[in-house]
């Protein structure tokens, strides 16, 4: 049965090399540092939508045991070619099979933006399930309204579908999953585009 994500994943597989190269210089260092400061050394971290492993490698170098997941086979192959110190797996974030209370932290940078709102809500609830008590969640999404098909230079002129959020909408989605919001704010894109991102740090307290 055809899935609405099929076309987006097809695009990522087709542009994987160029996409990975283009985003490599622009990690969100401030957010990565804040996320890392909220975790103990050797914490188990899940990088959701890890692409070619840019953020996973940074987190691994900070002393965490990192698992990276993505639905693009080509991006996962690129990530695995970079390092043998991180487990990169092709997994659908909507179908996390990890044990309950498995991770200390989840880094979901620009990943749930491809999910429809119902799937995003269910996925964040799965994040809650696989996080340990006091575990930390970081999520970033594009600020705006509704579903949009985007064709841009970053995707080599190929179509990707995004679901945009208002800050109150994202915070409610995270709180409805059981998380407590630690901090939420809006920042500008680092890729020289007229785009704002909503960044949320949350904690599982249950």
Image (cartoon, rainbow, N blue to C red):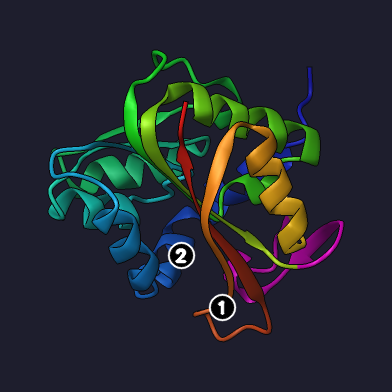
Which mark, by number, is residue 34?
Answer: none
Q: Nearer the viewer, residue 87 or 81?
A: 87
Left or right: 183 in relation to 120: left
- Contact, CB < 8 Å: mark 1 with mark 2? no
Discs 1/2, front = 1
Q: Reply yes or no: does residue 148 show up in magenta.
A: yes
Give the quarter of the figure containing the N terminus: top right
Name the residue that disc number 1 marks.
Answer: 189
Image check: 195 left or right of 64? right
- Assign a secondary structure to mark 1: loop
Question: Is residue 97 on the magenta stretch?
Answer: no
Calculate the distance from the C-alpha at mark 1 to the C-alpha at mark 2: 19 Å
Residue labelled with disc 2: 18
- Residue 9: quadrant of the picture: top right
Task: Identify the residue at image location x=35%, y=75%.
Answer: 25
The image shows residue 7 at horizontal and vertical percentages of 72, 42
Q: Quadrant of residue 95?
A: top right
Q: Is residue 12 left or right of residue 144?
A: left
Determine if residue 163 is in view: no
Q: How many marks?
A: 2
**Nearest the camera: 43 or 113?**
43
Compared to 56, does 43 lie above or below? above
Residue located 44% across and 29% down the image: 90
Q: Residues within 10 Å of mark 2 (few under 14, many from 20)?
A: some
Residue at image location 55% in from the left, 31% down from the top: 93
| Residue 136, percent from left and from top | 40, 43
For label 1, the crowd category at 10 Å Cα-Cα, with few meaning under 14, some 14 to 19 and many 20 or more, is some
Residue at 46 percent across and 15 percent down: it is 97
Task: Give residue 4's quadrant in the image.
Answer: top right
Mark 2 secondary-structure assignment:
helix
Highlighted magenta segment, given as a residue range: 144-160
The answer, for residue 181, to whether it is visible in the render is yes
């Amino acid at each position: 049965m055809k899935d609405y994500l099929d076309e987006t994943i097809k695009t990522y597989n087709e542009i994987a090399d160029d996409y990975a190269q283009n985003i490599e210089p622009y990690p969100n260092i401030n957010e990565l540092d804040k996320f890392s400061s909220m975790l103990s050394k050797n914490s188990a971290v899940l990088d959701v939508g890890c692409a070619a492993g840019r953020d996973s490698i940074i987190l691994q170098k900070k002393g965490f045991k990192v698992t990276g997941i993505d639905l693009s086979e080509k991006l996962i192959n690129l990530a695995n070619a970079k390092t043998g110190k991180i487990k990169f797996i092709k997994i659908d974030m909507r179908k996390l099979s990890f044990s309950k209370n498995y991770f200390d932290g989840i880094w979901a940078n620009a990943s749930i933006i491809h999910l429809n709102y119902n799937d995003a809500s269910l996925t964040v609830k799965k994040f809650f399930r696989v996080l340990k008590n006091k575990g930390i969640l970081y999520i970033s999404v594009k600020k705006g309204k509704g579903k949009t098909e985007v064709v841009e230079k970053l995707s080599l002129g190929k179509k990707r579908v995004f679901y945009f959020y208002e800050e109150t909408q994202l915070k409610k989605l995270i709180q409805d999953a059981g998380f407590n919001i630690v901090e939420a704010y809006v920042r500008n894109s680092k890729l020289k585009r007229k785009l704002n991102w909503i960044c949320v740090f949350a904690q599982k307290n249950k």
